[in-house]
Amino acid sequence: MSQSEHKSSGFILTLAALIIIIAGIKTAQALLVPFLLAFFISIICVGPFLWLQEYKIPAPVAMLLVIGTILLGGLAVVTLIGTSVNDFTNSLPAYQEKLHTQIFILFDWLENFGIKVSKSILLEHFNPGSIMQSAASMLATAGGVLTNSFMILLTVVFILFEASGMPNKLRAALPDADSSLASFEKFFTGVRQYLAIKTLVSIATGLIVTGGLLLLGLDYAPLWGMIAFLLNYVPNIGSIIAAVPAVLLAIIQLGPFSSLLVAALYLVVNLTMGSAVEPRLMGKTLGLSTLVIFMSLVFWGWVLGPVGMLLSVPLTMVVKIALEVNESTRWMAILLSSDTSAIVIAKN
């Protein structure tokens, strides 16, 4: 077999293995999603956990403090989502009816200016009421993930207890321990910084949106703030999706002028946080191109569902760092990167 044929067969085998792995991940979605959430939550928590231990606080006490904080935050989220979603779902038919009525009024107003729009065709392809239903369904899905909270919490506890001894285990288990530890530290630092900054920015986004909507008098303002908080983790399109149901409800409840104020609130918050605050805090933490971030959103959302969209950037960072370690796959890491200089330096 010639060298070119050997490379071709190797590429085909690698591609086939990759397809099988992706199919396996998609099939095991229900099992993998809670463990992925636990893994990334533990990455956020390991910093405070180790910091408390540096101040001579015993590991069990530090663990109780960290887990207690997680429990309080999770309880607040579950309570808000549960009560708000149930109330909003019960009121949804009335809101949808009002929305259809206002759309028909808009059609009649357009016809007065000679603009004829087929109501049946437009509503068949674009039904605004279904957008509000999708918002409720999305939060119901998030609530379904939280039903595995006990297993997620238990996994986080075990990961945190193992975190302090992991470097010694890697040194004993791997032949090239220094290189592996350097790669592990690079991955850990990058993902932890990204998740910590993204969480802080998302919390600020949710609080500002909630406060602004309360001032404007929109119903379920905390619910829309929670949606803004959650979807801020979704790159590129998350903030746009978060604004749609709130703006539609503002059209129904407050009228066209106030709905413009609601849209302006989301626009200002997202431009400020997404274009000014977050890039300044992130710096070059990600190292992923914009196209790769968007494609990862689509890919991980298809493989793992809504949670995959939330974790699309950290998961892609894991893949990129894993590709950088191996000489034969480093070219793929370069394609994923937004800045090749660091990889070229590492290669030389």
Image (cartoon, helix red, strand yellow):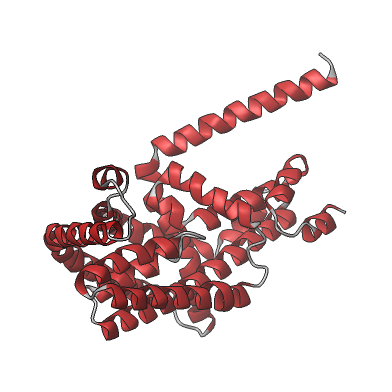
Q: Is residue 302 left or right of residue 256?
A: right
Q: How many marks?
A: 0
Q: Nearer the viewer, residue 38 or 280?
A: 280
Q: Quadrant of residue 124?
A: top left
Q: Nearer the viewer, residue 221 or 81?
A: 221
Q: Residue at x 19, y 68 (%)?
A: 84
Q: Residue at x 67, y 55 (%)?
A: 171
Q: Is residue 37 left or right of residue 50?
A: left
Q: Nearer the viewer, residue 96 or 274?
A: 96
The percent position of residue 92, horizontal first and vertical second, equals 16, 60
Q: Residue at x 28, y 83 (%)?
A: 216
* Quarter of the rendering occupied by the C terminus: bottom right
Vertical order, 155 against 199 (above or below): above
The percent position of residue 166, horizontal first and vertical second, equals 57, 59
Q: Is residue 187 visible?
A: yes
Q: Is residue 219 visible?
A: no
